[in-house]
């Protein structure tokens, strides 16, 4: 016999667990909540406090919208002031590089019915005079976003659940979840066992180990950021703030402290809540660039934050087997979406059918993926799967990143001769996805090494990827005196690394900047068209780069463009 | 209750500091808290929530109960901050 | 923003009290370049606090004068070309991998990279809350001593000293000699127990001698010492005007009906000491529970090395021990650190180790004599604030404990305790007592608050200005990168 028998066992006392417990008890279910540490001890209690629907992944926008709609009523509903301030979210662009990508992103969000707009710097500063306009070029603004006190939100839901009759085991780590013959799941902790037909696994990063025991390899990494707060200050602003580079957020809490966080986002395979001086100083230096006179405020406290994250930036909410319902991997969006997710999870358990609102978060969406990982800058990218790195059970290397469908090739009239990279600067948003894709393909590193392809920004609204255009003249091949260049049957020139002496002759003779030197390799590198399937083409979201037959005038125009804008590379 | 400067202990140069707009006499080397205590001001900081009076407590800069605005910088620990000529102190109580 | 290269030194010592000074002197004499850092205006620490008043001609009362003089003799050793003493300098953060300390002081914010770091940050006074303990006029006994020593200031006329331990009697003598009137000393331990445990000091005549001399002076002045008593309440509207004391039983639980009201204008408290472990804590040094003093302290091996390579701890930081222990451990840590750098400190570390262990044994028996008793938690009735910074009452804490909280960090979502300016330095130990009292858990099972930078609040410009160029990160890295929105 188990020590406890319940209708539903919830593993994890964070926002998702507590909100779900609340909704279930309200519907009369017998709930047992099991938490390894204390309420809100994990990611929820370390959260930035943002309640945001803007700048979400498209599939998540409806969920975030529905959750934001709940927040104004939560203080009353929970009987605790959650310190919710709905004054809007500003995502600040700090350099011209970000203007186009963000404007494109604003359009994407608008197409999902979000009331979000692009503001020029004058409008931003009119809304928030405390910002340093000199360091801002503009911002996306969503007036319905806001922020709240994460502690109050989590404990508020927990209180209500406890009042509603939920039983609680705190400081009690679940070690295993066993499927029994009776169709019930048996939850084992060092001191107790508990049995229920349904177990909701909402343990954040802690879910991974439990999933593994069940036989599901949860693609989850912990992205560590750092949070800090100043001493209470006079009112500065009410909005929630982010930045385009995603490595800083800030808000002023209701007691006046400016709560901010960020730094270099690091992916860790564990629950790492360290704080480091580097991150702290970077975040402080960064926010000091954005908020006037903040350097004269005192830093009071720092703490480590956790974002248990999935490859596509969305949670996994799905049944793992008959009785275990997983809801984890909220990628730092759990606090904002937790209240609505709790509602839907309770509904799913009680009614037995998946709520339509959770359809996008099924676990098999990762099947057939390239293995993916978060990059240190917070962007994510596919990493080429090898037998060593591929996640067990998640299928063969697949077709790429789902929400960035590879563009269909547009055949030109020209159908003879080899295919080449065709670049349309009018369509380039400057997002640099091509740089990431190229780096992954060639360097197996998801960083913007800017070696073979490099986006230049000659002006605020003109961007151009500089890359080898595979000219017929082949200046580089002719210039090389060390037999370090070869040409294949498709006419693609590539570098023989062993022979390269870094004499740079090829770089000097190339008029279009198609070759760069890699100090790490002690050799020059250039585009090799990825054996006929260029990664930059595959991952260009705006189809600015295509791989096709190209006629002579178009090719010459491209060569001229490259040559003209090559100097911009120096100033980037 | 006025704290007493112990007789016979030599003091540094007299220094005038301004506390809440009023000039008070202190001596070089004294902490701001000591100068306040010597004028009889024990009540240095007013707590935020209930406005309760707070003052010199730990004396070694760990408790932050004796904080005041000093030369425009808020929440300076007066027990570990020395007076200096022209020093301007604003206490919240 | 251009990252600055950190300053460098061979041995960085944080805290210029007895341990830090002893370490600095021995290491510098061995030829090491030493940087000795202290947040205070003068070296000496709290124990050898030096007057910050005029330089010469002090006429301090006897008990203070000898202590000041001893300190002066010790500090004379700092006059060595190898020692860079930096006072008024707060070490607010540490990077354990690179052994970099982050400082802010008179010359602004800097980073300091060392080959060895010695943490000798001393201790804080332990205090237990009761109604009225936040009133101006209630001060810590050590805080009163500091006013006498450093400021030549007597903070009141008529005093009550309450708590437990030898410091109460010493402070009372010093206050007496400065002209104060002592209404009473209230000692938590019952008289019989006090004498029984004192016999463990047999043979340590200097310790016993100090105690006996103090008692003699108090007897002459007819100062009542109330053993087995506690302060129960501070009276007064805007400042202290009186105190209520009560008898306690063996568990420290106050006996109803035993209240006595004393007319006093100042109350000095001391319940022993707590090691200052913030920096070793941030550095990730392993901590251990010191049963003798009931507090967590930094763990070291016999050479005073912590669990983090290159970092030492000496003195109170690795367990309350008093000035004698601190002096010996300072020498030992300084000598070992210097030897590790290839220098010859001309000391016999094995012998120092032995002496240090002996001194630790004496300190341990002293510690066991004056335990904080669980009954004191009952004095903190629900309306009494326990977190002075965030103004959180004992009742709020107890409500959170009823919701299942058993660790200090778990209290934060419920109550905001320890989230104010003092970073839980005052309330942390109080909360451990209350949680233990309410839950029945042993004190050693209740972990202290996680140590976090900054050790004390620092201006953002000081944080941002101290960017150490330890290799890879640059401002360009920071603002570069394109990502899906996460913030």
Image (spheres, coloured by chain):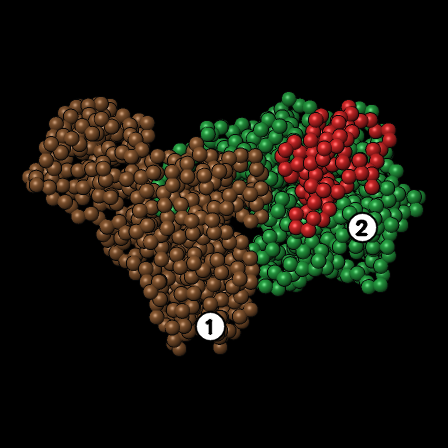
**Where C446 sits versus A567, above or below?**
below
In-image side of A150 versus C147 (left or right): left
* Residue C23 coordinates in the image, percent (x, y): 65, 33
Front position in the image: C462 or C97: C462
> Which residue occupies 65% across, 54% down?
C392
Tag 2's secondary structure?
Answer: loop
> Which residue occupies 69% across, 29% down?
B87
Tag 1's secondary structure?
Answer: loop
**Chain drawn green, letter?**
C
Chain of the residue under label 2: C
The numbered dot on residue C236 is: 2
Q: Colour of chain B?
A: red
Using the rendered image of the protein, determine whether residue C73 is visible from the camera's viewpoint.
Answer: no
In-image side of B68 versus A464 (left or right): right
The numbered dot on residue A27 is: 1
Find the distance from the CA under tag 2 to the CA under tag 1. Answer: 53 Å
* Residue A252 coordinates in the image, percent (x, y): 52, 45
């Amino acid at each position: 016999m188990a020590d406890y028998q319940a209708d539903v066992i919830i593993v994890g006392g964070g926002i998702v667990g507590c909100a779900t417990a609340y909704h279930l008890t309200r519907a009369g279910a017998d709930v047992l909540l099991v938490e390894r540490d204390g309420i809100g001890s994990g990611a929820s209690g370390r959260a930035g406090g943002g309640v945001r629907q803007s700048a979400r992944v498209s599939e998540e926008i409806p969920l975030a919208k529905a959750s934001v709609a709940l927040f104004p009523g939560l203080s009353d509903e929970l009987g605790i002031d959650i310190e919710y301030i709905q004054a809007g979210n500003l995502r600040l662009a700090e350099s011209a590089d970000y203007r186009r990508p963000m404007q494109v992103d604003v359009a994407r969000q608008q197409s999902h019915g979000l009331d979000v707009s692009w503001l020029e710097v004058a409008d931003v500063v009119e809304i928030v005079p405390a910002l340093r306009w000199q360091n801002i070029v503009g911002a996306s603004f969503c007036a319905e976003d806001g922020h709240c006190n994460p502690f109050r939100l989590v404990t508020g839901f927990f209180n209500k659940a406890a009042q509603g009759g939920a039983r609680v085991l705190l400081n009690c780590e679940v070690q295993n979840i066993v499927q029994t013959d009776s169709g019930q799941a048996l939850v084992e902790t060092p001191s107790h066992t508990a049995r229920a037909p349904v177990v909701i696994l909402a343990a954040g990063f802690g879910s991974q180990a439990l999933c593994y025991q069940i036989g599901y390899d949860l693609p989850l990494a912990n992205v560590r950021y750092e949070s800090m707060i100043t001493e209470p200050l006079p009112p500065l602003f009410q909005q929630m703030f982010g930045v385009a580079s995603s490595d800083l957020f800030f808000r002023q809490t209701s007691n006046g402290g400016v709560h901010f966080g960020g730094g270099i986002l690091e992916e860790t395979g564990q629950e790492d809540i360290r704080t480091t001086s580097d991150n702290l100083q970077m975040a402080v230096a960064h926010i000091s660039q954005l908020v006037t006179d903040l350097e004269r405020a005192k830093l009071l406290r720092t703490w480590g934050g956790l974002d248990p994250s999935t490859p596509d930036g969305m949670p996994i909410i799905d049944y793992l087997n008959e009785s275990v319902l997983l809801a984890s991997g909220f990628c730092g969006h759990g606090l904002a979406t937790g209240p609505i997710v709790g509602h839907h999870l309770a509904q799913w358990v009680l009614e037995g059918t998946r709520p339509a609102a959770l359809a996008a978060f099924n676990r098999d969406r990762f099947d057939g993926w390239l293995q993916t990982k978060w990059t240190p800058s917070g962007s994510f990218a596919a990493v080429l799967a090898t037998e060593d790195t591929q996640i067990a059970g998640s299928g063969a290397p697949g077709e790429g990143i789902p929400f960035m469908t590879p563009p269909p090739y547009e055949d030109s009239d020209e159908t003879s001769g080899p295919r080449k990279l065709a670049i349309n600067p009018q369509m380039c948003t400057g997002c640099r996805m091509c740089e990431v894709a190229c780096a992954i393909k060639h360097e197996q590193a998801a960083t913007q090494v800017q070696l073979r392809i490099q986006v230049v920004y000659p002006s605020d609204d003109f961007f151009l990827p500089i890359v080898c255009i595979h000219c017929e003249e082949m200046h580089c091949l002719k210039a090389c005196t060390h037999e370090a260049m070869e040409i294949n049957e498709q006419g693609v020139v590539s570098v023989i690394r062993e022979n390269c002496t870094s004499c740079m002759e090829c770089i000097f003779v190339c008029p279009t900047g198609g070759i760069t030197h890699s100090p790490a390799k002690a050799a020059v590198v250039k585009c090799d068209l990825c054996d006929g399937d260029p990664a930059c083409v595959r991952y260009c979201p705006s189809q600015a780069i295509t791989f096709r037959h190209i006629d002579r005038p178009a090719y010459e125009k491209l060569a001229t463009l490259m040559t003209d804008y090559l100097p911009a590379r120096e100033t980037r | 209750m006025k704290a007493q400067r112990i007789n016979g202990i030599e003091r540094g140069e007299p220094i005038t500091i301004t506390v809440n707009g009023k000039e008070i006499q202190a001596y070089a080397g004294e902490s701001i808290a000591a100068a306040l205590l010597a004028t009889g001001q024990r009540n240095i900081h007013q707590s935020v929530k209930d406005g309760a009076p707070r003052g010199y407590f730990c004396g070694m800069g760990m408790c932050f109960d004796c904080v005041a605005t000093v030369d425009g910088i808020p929440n300076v620990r007066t027990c570990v901050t020395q007076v200096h000529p022209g020093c301007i102190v604003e206490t919240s109580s | 923003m251009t990252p600055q290269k950190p300053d460098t030194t061979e041995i960085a010592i944080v805290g210029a009290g007895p341990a830090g000074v002893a370490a600095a002197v021995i290491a510098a004499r061995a030829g090491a370049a030493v940087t000795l850092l202290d947040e205070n205006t003068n070296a000496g620490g709290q124990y050898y606090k030096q007057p910050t008043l005029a330089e010469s001609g002090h006429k301090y009362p006897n008990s203070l004068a000898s202590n000041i003089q001893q300190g002066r003799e010790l500090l004379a050793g700092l006059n060595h070309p190898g020692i860079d003493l930096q006072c008024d300098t707060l070490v607010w953060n540490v990077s354990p991998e690179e052994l970099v300390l982050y400082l802010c002081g008179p010359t602004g914010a800097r980073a300091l990279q060392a080959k060895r770091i010695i943490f000798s940050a001393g201790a804080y006074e332990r205090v237990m809350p009761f109604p009225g303990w936040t009133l101006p006029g209630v001060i810590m006994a050590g805080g009163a001593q500091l006013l006498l020593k450093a400021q030549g200031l007597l903070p009141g006329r008529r005093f009550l000293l309450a708590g437990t331990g030898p410091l109460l009697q010493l402070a009372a003598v010093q206050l007496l000699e400065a002209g104060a009137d002592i209404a009473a000393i209230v000692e938590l331990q019952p008289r019989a127990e006090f004498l029984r445990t004192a016999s463990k000091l047999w043979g340590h005549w200097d310790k016993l001698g100090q105690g006996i001399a103090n008692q003699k002076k108090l007897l002459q002045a007819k100062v009542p010492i109330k053993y087995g008593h506690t302060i129960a309440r501070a009276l007064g509207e805007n400042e202290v005007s009186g105190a209520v004391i009560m008898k306690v039983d063996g568990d420290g639980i106050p006996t109803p009906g035993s209240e006595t009201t004393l007319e006093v204008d100042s109350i000095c408290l001391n319940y022993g000491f707590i090691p200052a472990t913030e920096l070793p804590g941030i550095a990730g040094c392993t901590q251990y529970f010191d049963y003798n003093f009931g507090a967590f302290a930094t763990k070291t091996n016999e050479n005073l090395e912590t669990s983090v390579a290159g970092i030492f701890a000496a003195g109170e930081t690795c367990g309350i021990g008093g000035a004698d222990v601190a002096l010996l451990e300072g020498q030992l840590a300084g000598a070992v650190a210097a030897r590790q750098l290839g220098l010859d400190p001309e000391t016999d570390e094995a012998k120092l180790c032995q002496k240090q262990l002996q001194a630790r044994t004496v300190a341990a028996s002293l510690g066991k004599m004056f335990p904080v008793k669980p009954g004191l938690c009952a004095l903190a009735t629900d309306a009494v604030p326990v977190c002075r910074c965030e103004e959180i009452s004992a009742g709020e804490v107890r409500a959170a404990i009823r919701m299942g909280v058993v660790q200090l960090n778990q209290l934060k979502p419920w109550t905001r305790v320890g989230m104010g300016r003092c970073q839980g330095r005052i309330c942390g130990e109080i909360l451990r007592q209350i949680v233990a009292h309410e839950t029945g858990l042993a004190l050693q099972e209740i972990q202290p608050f996680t140590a976090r930078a900054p050790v004390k609040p620092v201006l953002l410009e000081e944080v941002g200005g101290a960017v150490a160029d330890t290799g890879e990160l640059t401002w360009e890295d920071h603002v570069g990168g394109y990502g899906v929105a996460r913030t």
